Amino acid sequence: MAPIRRRQAGFTLVEVMIVLAITLLIAALVYKATRASWLLYQTQTHVTERGFSGVRALDDMAVEIARAGYGLGDAGPVFLGTLDGTRAIDAITLRSNPEGIVGELEEDLTDPEQFVAVDGAALFAEGDEVLLADDEPNKLERAQVTGARPNVLRLRSHDTPTRGFKRPPWSARRTRVLKVREVGFYLTTDRTGVPAVARKAPGQSEQILVRYVEALQFEYLSSRGLADPRSLLVRRPQTTPDGVRITLRLRPNPALPPVVVPPRTVLVSREPHWATIPFDVQGYHSIGLAGVIGQDPVSGAKTVRMHAWHDTTPVF
Amino acid sequence: MARHHPGLLNARERGAALLIVLIALAALMPLALLLSDFAWRRQRQVNARQQDLGGEAAVRGALDLVMARIQSGRLDLRGPDQSEQFELEEPESRPVRVRVSRQTDAVLSVEGRLLTPEEASTVDADELGIDGLGNVVHQYRRLEIYLVEAESPARRPFGAVRLLAAVARLDTGEIECIGMRYDRGYFREP
């Protein structure tokens, strides 16, 4: 009977001390492991957030760059930081005409107060941003529709402070009126003064894509290699897609454990949005042709809307 | 009389041991959840990126294939409103549904105009002229216009990638892409 009584007596002080010591040791190890894991979790989350924010911002820019020029034909799709063509390596403004809305002047345009006949005027609405593109190379002007009636439009320039046209006259049957959508990406600072990359699209407020930005850089690549960005303002009679290389450097968030954020670079090829159709063997007579895929509002069927222009100056 | 074998722990000690184990599990559970959340989030981000890139490459490949088939005559749509659908067999892991539909032919004039259907029916598309340098010049060019829709379907929670392209086939058989765009998201079945 003695062993049973001894078991019922409970633990000795030594046993309790040993258990206590072991428990404390285990608790200390668990605390250390938890703390290290929490730090690891925060660090990895920081790395993931930085990496993915960068990828998402690059992806957003890449999608717009690939669409640049869609529906515009050869009318200078890629422009630099500011709309007047000033060189800026940390900003880009991309133009497209996603609905493929195009008109053609039926009479000369010189006066911003005057209504002029436009073939396709019914497609435009007051307030639309448009681009005037002449068959003459490099003759482009930004404008806005200030009045729209079934067959006529009133247009004023965006490129001069007086709203008069910079390079009048805009000739009948040579000038296309292209509706444009402009999306800008640029380096800015948010409300708290943190450097950030922002996106601005028509009808939308400025959207911050990623914060804590060290640098944003756009390099323009032509089929002949790295080009002066200003050369993209010049229309070229070719369909070879140009490319834009985006480099984005992010800083770590100072409120989180320090991490190293490697710079990310992506090369975006601009997709073919128009083609040159030759009319002779030598290619002296070529017509540009652009197609935009839209949807018929009644049947819902997809249709191709096209517009054409002189890609070369005829020598008749 | 059968001999009674005492257990390793008595009833009270077993209760204490169970309690300690439960406390230990409760302490380690948040840690495990944090780590699994991190791993899951990262995996989801990588998957989303891979899906987008893979989908774009697949539909772009489909466009190249369609252009080659139109050029070679393997894809032969005789008139407007005719269409053909097929599914790409390669790669098996990423099916791509393709629909090619022929649109109304376009007739371009050397003046840089697209003729209306009425005008196009009255002109001789094979008419030639001579320019100021004495070169032979087409007065018109007739183009077959094709609409290509290629879609890498959505695999939830990842959206689909769709390519829409307008392709022109010249009367010489050459193929030109005159406009294309990618869309991402969830699309209703036609």
Image (spheres, coloured by chain):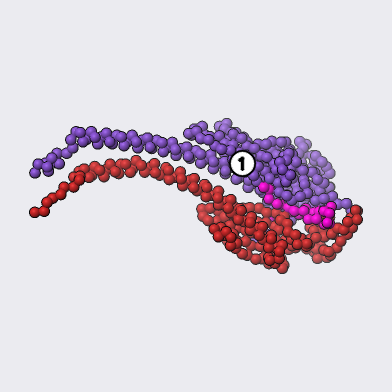
Chain colours: A purple, B red
Q: Position of residue B181 (x, y in %)?
A: 66, 53
| Residue A206 makes an appearance in the image | no
* Residue nearer the viewer, A109 or B63: B63
The residue under the point 65% across, 46% down is: A268
The residue under the point 48% across, 40% down is: A45
Q: Position of residue B97 (x, y in %)?
A: 60, 61
* Residue nearer the viewer, B62 or A125: B62
| Residue B47 makes an appearance in the image | yes
Q: Position of residue B67 (x, y in %)?
A: 69, 60
Q: Which residue bears the numbered disc 1?
A: A265
Q: Position of residue A49 (x, y in %)?
A: 52, 40
**Residue A292 colored in magenta in the image:** yes
* Residue nearer the viewer, A199 or A20: A20
Residue type (three-letter) at the residue carrying disc 1? Thr
Label 1: few (<14), some or many (≥20) within 10 Å?
some
**Residue A158 colored in magenta in the image:** no
Indicate left or right for A219 with A28 as reference.
Answer: right
Mark 1, chain letter? A
The residue under the point 37% across, 35% down is: A32
**In the figure, residue B174 lies in which quadrant?**
bottom right
Q: Secondary structure at mark 1?
A: strand
**In the figure, residue B116 lies in which quadrant?**
bottom right
The magenta segment: A269-296
Indicate left or right for B57 with A233 as reference.
Answer: left
